[in-house]
Amino acid sequence: MTHILKLCYEIAKMAIIFILCTVLFYYVLKALDHEYQNLDRYDAPQGKAMKVSSSQENDIIDRIGIFFRLGE
């Protein structure tokens, strides 16, 4: 009988530890989400940033050629 009680005690202890770790993990992820939610990803670049692409009007044949060449 004492063996069964020890087993139940160990199972309950592991379940409590698992639940506490899960709750802690949830709140850490929630805090990280809150931290990065206010970060504006599309700010204008600072310093010596250069524009590396241009929005030229390419005709459809050029675009298809680039598609087949690069596989994108």
Image (tube, rainbow, N blue to C red):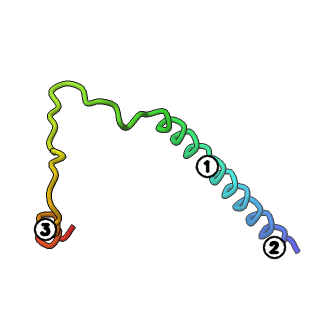
What residue is drawn where x is 54% and y is 37%?
A: 34
Residue identified by numbered label 2: 3
How far separated are the C-alphas under marks 2 and 1? 35 Å
What residue is rendered at 21% in x and 67% in y? Answer: 72
* Within-10-Å neighbours for mark 3: few <14, some 14–19, many 20+: few
**Could you tell me the amino acid type at mark 2?**
His
Q: Quick one: SS at disc 3?
A: helix
| CA neighbours of label 1 inside 10 A, class few (<14), some (14 to 19), many (20+) | few
Query: How far apart are the alpha carbons under marks 3 and 1?
Result: 51 Å
* Disc 3: which residue: 61
Image height of 68 relative to 63, above or below: below
Q: Amino acid at mark 1?
A: Tyr
- Mark 2 or 1, which is nearer the eye? 1
For label 1, the residue is 26
Give coordinates of residue 10: x percent, y percent. Answer: 74, 64
Q: Earlier in the sequence, mark 3 or mark 1?
A: 1
